[in-house]
Amino acid sequence: MAMEEERVKRSPNKYSTSVLVLHDALILTMDPEKRVFRNGAVAIRGDTILAVGQSQEIVSQFSYLSPQLINLHGHFLLPGFINTHVHTSQQLARGIADDVDLLTWLHDRIWPYESNMTEEDSYISTLLCGIELIHSGVTCFAEAGGQHVPGMARAVELLGIRACLAQSVMDAGEGLPPLWANRTAEEYIQSQKELHKQHNDTADGRIKIWFGLRQIMNSTDGLLTQTRDAAKELKTGIHMHVAEIPYENQLVVERQGVEHGTVTYLEKIELLQNNLLAAHTVWVNDHEIGLLSKSGVKVSHCPAAAMHMLGFAPVREMLDAGVCVSLGTDGAPSNNRMSIVDEMYLASLINKGREVFRKGTTDPTVLPAETILEMATLNGAKSVLWDKEIGSLEVGKKADLIVVNPSSWSMMPVHDSISGLVYSMRTENITSVMCNGHWIMLDKKIMTLNEEEVIFMAKNASRGLLERAGIRIPSRMNFL
Ligand SMILES: [Zn+2]
């Protein structure tokens, strides 16, 4: 059956007993044996994968159930990508802080923008962000901590994507907008517990609620330790920006009297645990890499944002030490492109280039394509504490998958399909996306909402928000 015909049919749902078989595809399973089927099939019932294997075998195995058959004509079938560091709230802020220094970025642009957001802004921002994520093959993302979790949750429910949502939490720091400056650690913990109660495991189990910590310079000790304990109590994760800039480490050394920086201090207060997702983690020394590995902390590497304003993260060293490193886009004002496909390409290139400076010699074997694919799928699933259900195409896991059409000027010819997915694939090669057994994009059309409507709403909302926040972007060059 053609994908076009499939579009008009209802997607399978949780309670459906009918079986769907996607066949005649090159299937990258990312299972423990790293099996790739040249001509494979996946059988799905409801939200779950029933079988993965050779096309002919799967089709005949399920023929007695008269399954709905979709011939993928040699397209590639992969697990959905997992973007482990996203600021959904910042999508309406794309382009408000390009080519400015970090303090201007934060104090004059991002904080005024975020502190003036309404819940409706957050809803629209998340919708727009979700559209871009889905187009790049993302079926699950981790929110870095933004405004109005209920608005985000409403958008995630509609988008049909999977997400770990977190509130932006800051109870200290210079220059905070007045609206944020007066909230205590206790209030933040209480409100996040409330959000967990209201939204965790909603949207057919697609939404998880995490604890947020914006970064150490905006956190009192009380907030750090109370967050540690509350996340443990609710058996959920903590998302935090860690060791982003040298100044952050300097400040921690001065204030806390530790030897190196944030990671060393977080170990001292027992915040380094396997439920911590540490974003960026650029300025860490070898000892701290050892601490991250020993404690099972997950690291989200965001290559574009790192190049934008942070520096080179020691990704090869972290992977060698056994740290689980995944990939993230960060937010639209620190990356502009929210495509995990671009991050895959960049991560491999940047880390190859970094080796030249580190060792004084070139090493094109650093971060090969299969490692990058693992970072974008399996490591992503581990990072969001969801690897029992997502991250690979295996029997019993959730049907979160993407279809890639390699027949384009950008990918052809494909002599090496694994490297082709990292070095040649563009966002545009991703044609269809399934999350939790539902097609959320088919033939590049988002199935869960009207894209044009969201773009219209986003343009209006962002204009109003910038006006309310008093943000003016200086014009460049000679505008007439
Ligand atoms: Zn971030």
Image (tube, rainbow, N blue to C red):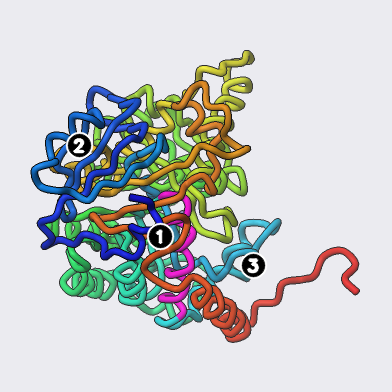
Q: Is residue 136 magenta?
A: yes
Identify residue for label 3.
96
Q: Quadrant of the C terminus?
A: bottom right
Q: CA distance from mark 2 to mark 3?
A: 52 Å
Q: Is residue 8 magenta?
A: no
Query: Which one is nearer the viewer's eye here, 110 or 394?
Result: 394
- Which amino acid type is shown beneath numbered disc 3? Ile
Task: Nearest to the eye among marks 1 and 3: give it.
Answer: 3
Identify residue for label 1.
214
Of helix, strand and loop, which mostly describes the magenta segment? helix
Labels 2 and 3: the sequence-earlier one? 2
Q: Is residue 427 left or right of residue 126?
A: right
Above/below status of 257 relative to 458: above
Magenta range is 121-137
Name the residue at 36% across, 68% down. Answer: 448
Identify residue for label 2.
59
- Which amino acid type is shown beneath numbered disc 1? Arg
Q: Which mark is residue 99?
A: none
Occupied quadrant, residue 358: top right
Residue 426 screen position, x and y as percent: 55, 43
Residue 181 screen position, x and y as percent: 43, 76
